[in-house]
Amino acid sequence: QLVTEADLLLLPYAAVLHRETRESLGISLEGNVVIFDEAHNLVDAVNGAHSCSVTLAQLHTAHRQLSSYLHRFSTRLSPSNMQQVQLLVHVITCLLRCLEQQQQAASSTSSGSTGCQ
């Protein structure tokens, strides 16, 4: 309630950058001046707010569970849902391949690119 009457608000990056957080706090950016202190940290704040980390073990678990789900319920899935689950399995397979290549490249002594193929 005080937000609507305030002349100045001091907020962490996450509260300003995340729409749902702003809405829950009753903050609107429209028609207001937004100043970021230490703006050189802004890119890291945006990346942090819109990213996550996934481990190789988590990807293996997701792949195993989705493959099992696909096998078990393939006759019950609509063609559209079947395609979506297959797409998820394919994306996870590609991520696994990429991370395993990076892991192998990092453990080998040869100098070369660790990018994914």
Image (cartoon, rainbow, N blue to C red):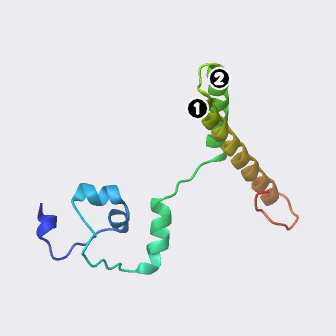
Give the percent coordinates (x, y) of residue 77: 59, 24
Q: Residue at x 61, y 37 (%)?
A: 84
The quadrant of the rendering that contains the C terminus is bottom right
Viewer-nearest residue: 23 or 11: 23
* 116 to the left or right of 27: right
* 83 to the left or right of 29: right
Residue 91 versus residue 21 in the image, above or below: above
Viewer-nearest residue: 13 or 103: 13
Task: Please tell me which of labels 2 and 1 falls first in the chain.
Answer: 2
The extreme right residue here reads 110
Label 2 and label 1: CA atoms lie apart by 9 Å
On residue 74, which mark appears?
Answer: 2
Q: Residues within 10 Å of mark 1 (few under 14, many from 20)?
A: few
Give the percent coordinates (x, y) of residue 57: 65, 41
On residue 81, which mark appears?
Answer: 1
Q: Secondary structure at mark 2?
A: loop
Image quarter of residue 81: top right
The quadrant of the rendering that contains the N terminus is bottom left
The extreme front residue here reads 79
Residue 37 versus residue 104 in the image, above or below: below
Determine if residue 61 is in view. Answer: no
Image quarter of residue 61: top right
Q: Residues within 10 Å of mark 2 (few under 14, many from 20)?
A: some
Report the amino acid beneath label 2: Ser
Report the amino acid beneath label 1: Asn
Q: Secondary structure at mark 1?
A: helix
Viewer-nearest residue: 117 or 61: 117
